[in-house]
Image (cartoon, coloured by chain):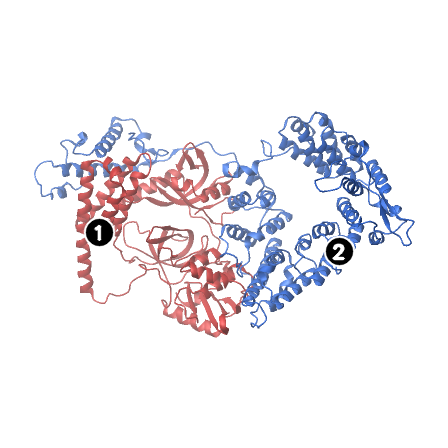
Chain colours: A blue, B red
Amino acid sequence: MNTRATTSAPYTASSDSGSTSSGTDDSARVWEELVTSALLGTDRRPPTVLAGTTGAGTTDAGTTGADPAGAGTTGADLAGALLDAAVLHTVRRRAGLRPGPAAPPLEPAPEDPRRPLPEAARRRLDQLLAGRAAPSPAAGRRGAVPDLAELLPQWLTLANERGYKAPPAALPALLDAARARTDLRPQALRLAGPRGLWLAGLNPEWRFALRGRGAAGRLPSPEDVQGVRALWDEGLFAERVALLAAVRSGDAAAGLALLASTWTAERAEDRLMFLDSLRTGLSDADEEFLEAALADRSRNVRATAAELLAALPASAFAGRMAGRAATCVGLDRTAESPVISVEAPHECDAAMERDGVVPTPPAGRGERSWWLGQLVEAAPLACWIGRFGGRTPEEIVALPVADDWQGELHAAWCRAAVRQRDASWSRALLGAPAVPPATGPGTSSLAERAQLLATLPADERAHWVAAFVAAHGLSEAFQLLGVCAVPWAEPLGAAVIDALDIARDAGSYPWSFSGVMGLAERCLAPEAARHLDSLTALPDEEEDTAPGAGGYWSEAFQRLVATLRLRAAMRAELDGGPRPAGATV
Amino acid sequence: MPASTVVDMNAMGVRWTAEQVLALAPDDASRRAGSELGTAGPWSGTGRGEGAVWGVCGGSGGRSYETAVDLTAPAYTCGCPSRKLPCKHALGLLLLQASDVTAVTDDTPPEWVALWLAKRREEGAGSVTRPAGTGTSGTVADPEAARRRAERRAARITAGAQELEQRLTDLLRGGLATAEQSGYGLWEETAARMVDAQAPGLAGRVRELGAIPGSGPGWPVRLLEECALTHLLDRAWLAADRLPAGFATTVRTRVGLTVPADGVPVRDHWLVLAQYDTADARLTTRRVWLHGVTTGRTAFLLSFGAAGRAPGLALPVGALLDGELTPHAGAARLRAEPGEHFVPVDAPVSPPPGGPVGAALDAYGRALSEDPWLESWPVTLRQVVPARAEYGWQLADADGREALPLTPAAQNRPGLWRLVALSGGAPLTVFGECGHRGFTPLAAWSAEAPAETVPLI
């Protein structure tokens, strides 16, 4: 057994740091002897260093004599003497400890020029990060307390928008939060900044933060032509994707040139990823390159190129698609009133295939309608105005469609409106919000409606969804609310509050609306809190309501109000403006 | 302290965080119930001022309760029938002001609050929650009976110390190697005998001895060191009448007797350096480190809670508090009892003066001469950087020569990463406990924000 393995190897015992006189050697030898003897037992292995000195030189030898066994060196004497010697050694060693040698210092963390958080916001961040770790309350019932974990993403976004840096002491908790929740990562790492990356490099648990970054942890600036070239030619795939994205977002043409320079030499999977990064800053200048990519060896690359080209209504590709679509869809001139007639394509020829049309339909779909859908989706929406005699999108959508083709045709137009981000067609396809969803002119799918809404200006979106909620309540509104800009603009906030009030009066349980409640907590404008005060009170229980629901509703509204107040406070703290009256922080 | 010196808490920027409030809860049920009341909904007539916060909480069935908290003590009053202290209403009120800045605004206390505050602060004690076993216990009813009780207890401790001494001697004669085989049970039994002997200090040491054989490489050395120190304590107790008075007091403290806080009270502005809990199956012990700005004294307060319950004392780390501490007797005189009122002070905070790592070990060495059983000593290190050695993290002088290792426990705490993050490779000031196992960092101050105390535990 290695008796030298003392508890404090990193320390230097004073006896070692001084001169190497024989006295210090003795001390170490004596201690080793004592440990060996103690380990084996003084009966079996009397400590030779104490032989003949038992009692002498120890602090209180007199009390050892109290042993009734009395005369001579007894076993108990010997053990006591060993302990006496050991305690002397122990205390002397502890009192004489000297510092050990310093290890090489850490590389200093890079400077972060961003401004520090205001004091109150710093405390708030601590609270939000601590709340993340706190256990959620007992199953099901969420209580009246705001859910701090849900507010963290919003707080991070607000702080980053204002150009703050994270307080150094909060970095470990911030990195832990980003590690646990991937949805937080981009914003959390942005706030953590260069010092966060520096710290993550020291702890393997935070390795995720370094992923997708070069060995140096930073990309060359897009103006650094040589640095960009070197990394593009020699970097790892992830580094190159990040580099291309950075260059492209700064200078779209430079990004395209970079990609084109090595395009033919890239592997098919890599080509797909690189091509995808052209979505940023897509313009007619990319047409030639994309047109060439339609001849790519990889089908996925071809499909992506076609998808990108379809978003360029002025491209030759769009023209070809418009031509094809026009031969299939038109006005039936033989009918008394205008009707859209549809003649789906009879074959998918080589030219169509080259333009990204997938010839084989998924199981359960007819191939002709499958081809039609793809043609209409890729054709520029503007071509239909001419095709239907100058009618507006609203008028076109309102036209009856012959032979049950309406569903297919409208669905394809929806996809086209979303892909081409065309607000006027989206508006037409959405129809009036108050019309019952199943009987509308355009689409009845909530998912499609949500996508169409996303192409409208924020203000118009809020109005449309507000009218929808006012007409149909909240049970189908969740997806639509999810695409509205945060905080909800009026009249949307008021519409949601009214609808919740109506749901409560109707005797529903609040947990039927927990999804909308959660959204409302995060998205309602904080000023809406004052409309809610009357709803937080505990109502009298009436006969026709669900038993106990009143208490739950009042709790849910209390949580809503508390969360809104908290969000208002969060924003005020980050703006560093005058504190609200009575602020305690 | 006269009530007139109680100043408005609000101006001080001192505020209880939700975490600190929850730490006051007597049990989990109160914590939950308090959290539910920690929103604006049920409250009316809330306000804060003169070091207190108050409000009226609407309860179930139309009843409502007047609740107030004196933040300077802290002390609580509530109209509810609950016997828990603090009750859920008091907790809810504190949580409300911790989490919602707009809910509780500055105000003058209404009459019922003002009366309660005046009564409390005149009487002093009142309903102050004093942790058990601390505080001046007042006058003894029958000094003669008390003396006889003390004698009987001393005799029992003496019997216990002799028994423990016998146990140690037997162990050394048979060899420490047998300690590994005999396992924890034998030690646990001996510890129980020390509890019977009313010597909790000895019982604690014995329990630690029992844990050493399972503590990894090098255990025989550690076991011999700790056996030897226990032996020294036994011997010192048995010879206490022949020891110098100061040292005899230290021995009595180490054995587990409560020594009175009979030192001269020290009034100062105290910076709260650190607060942390250690818990075993029976007891949660909270230790609060304070540093006096004018006197330069470092002191700690102890507060206890039964298993699973939070100790009553909670002070916000980084706050500067005006108040009085009464040191306990004993050589080191580090432990103290807090006076009735601690009032936040609006003054710039700066870290305690400190020195290089070598001076920290010197201080520990000097302290050992008065109390050889000391595990560590409070020190402040100045101009140190965290660095990574082969064995783990250390704190090194900025000149890159000497370093203190962090204790094995401190190597694995989240606080380590706060320390590293705060430094960013640059020198900082660190307060902690320096001992034979290494250094335990407890608080740090960076060069950019020297007024901000960053807790590391």
Q: Position of residue B247 (x, y in %)?
A: 24, 49
Q: Which residue occupies 46% across, 31% down?
A: A104
Q: Is residue B105 above or below residue A107?
A: below
Q: Which residue is mark 1?
A: B245
Q: Nearer the viewer, residue A181 or A82?
A: A181
Q: Nearer the viewer, residue A523 or B45?
A: A523
**Circle 2: residue type:** Glu
Q: Which mark is residue A460?
A: 2
Q: Position of residue A571 (x, y in %)?
A: 61, 55
Q: Position of residue B276 (x, y in %)?
A: 40, 51
**Circle 1: residue type:** Ala
Q: Chain of mark 2?
A: A
Quarter of the rendering occupied by the N terminus of chain A: top left
Q: Residues within 10 Å of mark 1 (few under 14, many from 20)?
A: few
Q: Residues within 10 Å of mark 2 (few under 14, many from 20)?
A: some
Q: Chain of mark 1?
A: B
A233 lies left or right of B252:
right
Q: Which residue occupies 57% across, 36% down?
A: A210
**Residue B152 can be seen in this image:** yes
Q: Nearer the viewer, residue A575 or A379?
A: A379
Q: Nearer the viewer, residue A293 or A567?
A: A293
Q: Secondary structure at mark 2?
A: helix
B51 lies left or right of B150:
right
**Residue B448 can be seen in this image:** no
Place residue A87 in its image quadrant. Answer: top left
Dot in front, 2 or 1: 2
Q: Position of residue A391 (x, y in %)?
A: 88, 51
Q: Secondary structure at mark 1?
A: helix
B304 lies left or right of B239:
right
